[in-house]
Amino acid sequence: MTHEMKKVIIRQQGNADVLEVVRSQIPSLNRLEVLVDVEAAGINYVDVYMRNGAVQYASLPFVPGFEGFGTVRELGPDVTTLKVGTRIAWINALGSYAQQIALPIEQAIIIPDCFGIDEGLLFQGVTAQYLINEYCEIKPGSVVLVHAAAGGVGQLLVQWLKHLGAVVIATASNEEKLHTVRALGADHLVNYSTDSFLDAVNQITNGRGVDVAFDAVGAATFSDTVKALAARGTAIAYGQASGVAPDIQVYPLILKGARIAGGSLFTYIADPAEMQERAAEWIDGIQEGWLTASKTTRFSIEEVADAHRQIESRNTQGKLALIM
């Protein structure tokens, strides 16, 4: 058994060029950890924010990545709930851009043996789960606006909302992405690069607006997202792909009893038991067939800088991952 592995390290914050692939010793285990052979590590916007300094979470140097899946290779001395060979995923363990990771057992989510890379990376699926469940009840006929609908979370939101009977207005930045969203069942499509999604919402809803809006784009969309709300509607900001959204005036919200909420996955998975429940709902949806995981664009660990440039370009669809 080799005692070395490859991992990605960040020694200073900056553009994608600061991502460095190095060789290091395989990590040793604490008593309640397992050593995992990482099959794939998910690439998410939070990784970009940590790399460029927008989010200060870890001291330099650090190994990025919170998400991955793989196979248990070795058990810590006090581990009794997992076995060598068990396939597991995780979504809250910094250091996932590595060929092996020492994972606390409380972060391990057992996944079906039939799950491949598309299903086994759970970060976006659990994000969709909390967004659907935490802010307001989605009922049959609820009108919902989903921005970046061809992205990893967006594709899952569209499917989940249609499963619940909602009317989905989906936006994306080009026609290719809208074709993807159409195939998932979205009712109305808007190219927000060429058309005003606010005008489209008003036309589709006869001026009523939407009951719920999910916005991961941020600066380029959020002001009009709030204007698109119906009376008693809710806008959820859960990302800032185009930059931080501007401040919102409160008085227009007061007039129509509308609400703004912020969303962060880590708030809803800080309790490992809650994380397991949320992940189980995603896994059930896949196994029952009403959810289909988005396709994963794959990069080798040596291509990590290119992968970050791709996600920052906002030209990608679905999930991005490093294959170990």
Image: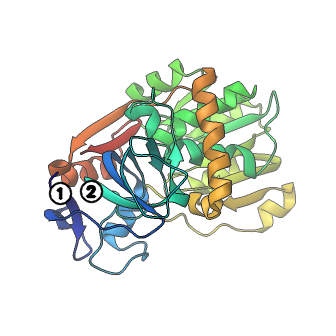
Image-quadrant location for residue 116 = top left
Contact check, label 2 and label 1, Cβ < 8 Å: yes
Q: Considering depth in this image, is 201 or 138 the residue closer to the camera?
A: 138
Total marks in image: 2
Colouring mode (rainbow / by chain / secondary structure / one colour):
rainbow
Residue underneath mark 2: 98
What residue type is disc 1 on?
Lys
Q: State the separation of the CA atoms marked 2 and 1.
A: 6 Å
What residue type is disc 2 on?
Ala
Residue underneath mark 1: 6
Q: Residue furthest bottom?
A: 59
Q: Residue at x 42, y 77 (%)?
A: 56
Q: Is residue 92 above or below residue 128?
A: below
Horizontal relation, residue 30 to residue 141: left or right: left
Horizontal relation, residue 228 to residue 247: left or right: right
**For mark 1, does the 10 Å Cα neighbourhood hold few (<14), some (14 to 19), or many (20 or more) residues?**
some
- Say what secondary structure mark 2 lies in: loop
The x, y position of residue 31, in whole percent, is 45, 69
| Residue 218 seen in the current view | no
Q: Residue at x 39, y 39 (%)?
A: 319
Q: Considering depth in this image, is 257 or 54 the residue closer to the camera?
A: 54
Which mark is drawn over residue 157?
A: none
Image-quadrant location for residue 198 = top right
Q: Considering depth in this image, is 158 or 276 the residue closer to the camera?
A: 276
